[in-house]
Amino acid sequence: MPARPSLLYVTDLAYPARGRRYCDEDIDLTARLRESFDLALCHPRDTTALMDAFDAVVVRNSGPVLGYQEEYDAFRAQALARGTRVYNPLHGRGDMAGKRYLLDLTATGHPVIPTADRPEDLHRLPEAAAYAVKPKAGADSIGLRFVPYEELAGLTYGELLVQPRVDFRYEVSFYFVDDLYQYALYAPDPERRWVLEPYEPTEEDLAFARRFIDWNTLDHGIQRVDACRAPGGELLLVELEDLNPYLSLDRVPEKTRARFVADLADSLHRFLAA
């Protein structure tokens, strides 16, 4: 009987996520994936020391990289040097590479919340009651603050991004495995952003989300396209999460969850065979 592929599944089961439990999702997902793979869990700080014993590394709910930046940088460097298979692949252009892509998308006219990182570009941002200031390497709202326009000139730029605070109707997320759309969830109440409900996207909504999946050019992997519904009715990209997107699988029906796991297992098999 041929050996089954082996996966090193990277997760921080103790990460204190706000409004949700990362560990429950990974416990359930790994239990399901064990039907197709030999699998072991490890903390992100231990990945480099353990990864050579497995066919691939799967990075899942590992928490913000800022909490273990040195270890993450060493893992990336060693994985690239050794040719380690990492899922998602390490050439992602979204959050995996920091928030600079928001500047690139703004410059090329994509439907994204307008973003600047230099004082001389602030005049290009639309007028707003307040502006969001966030670190380029941020995640999970770490370092996010809101300031009036008058305070923007006094900021120390270089590693900061500035965006107008959008008075959006709601936030919505679209989840993909490779280029396969899986499901969408939204937060009807902007004040309770982690209370998610199933969302039925329109054809236009899906075209919006696929635009960023295509832009990212990842042949394999899990991606989450986060957007907000602006006052004018259009969708604007908030972020393209391609490193370790939380999936909120507990918010979808079992049939949807089972299809997601099946598509994920198929994607992993294709990834290992490529």
Image (tube, rainbow, N blue to C red):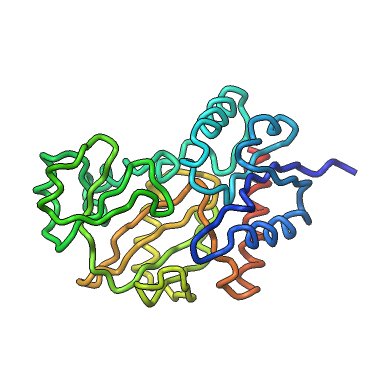
Which residue is nearer to you in this view: 273 or 108?
Answer: 108
Residue 33: % across, % down: 72, 55
**Rendering quarter of residue 118:** top left
Question: What residue is shown at x 75% (from left), y 42% (from top)?
Answer: 6
Q: In the rendered image of this protein, does residue 70 appear above or below residue 217?
A: above
Which residue is nearer to you in this view: 273 or 101?
Answer: 101
Question: What residue is shown at x 77% (from left), y 54% (from top)?
Answer: 34
Q: In the rendered image of this protein, does residue 23 appear above or below residue 233?
A: above
Q: Quadrant of the C terminus?
A: top right
**Rendering quarter of residue 53:** top right
Question: What residue is shown at x 52% (from left), y 44% (from top)?
Answer: 219
Q: In the rendered image of this protein, does residue 121 appear above or below residue 176?
A: above
Question: What residue is shown at x 65% (from left), y 73% (from top)?
Answer: 254
Determine whether, in the image, residue 11 is placed left or right of residue 175.
right
Count the marks: how many?
0
Q: Quadrant of the N terminus?
A: top right
Determine whether, in the image, residue 13 is placed left or right of residue 174.
right
Residue 200: % across, % down: 44, 76
Determine whether, in the image, residue 41 is placed left or right of residue 230.
right
Which residue is nearer to you in this view: 209 or 115?
Answer: 115
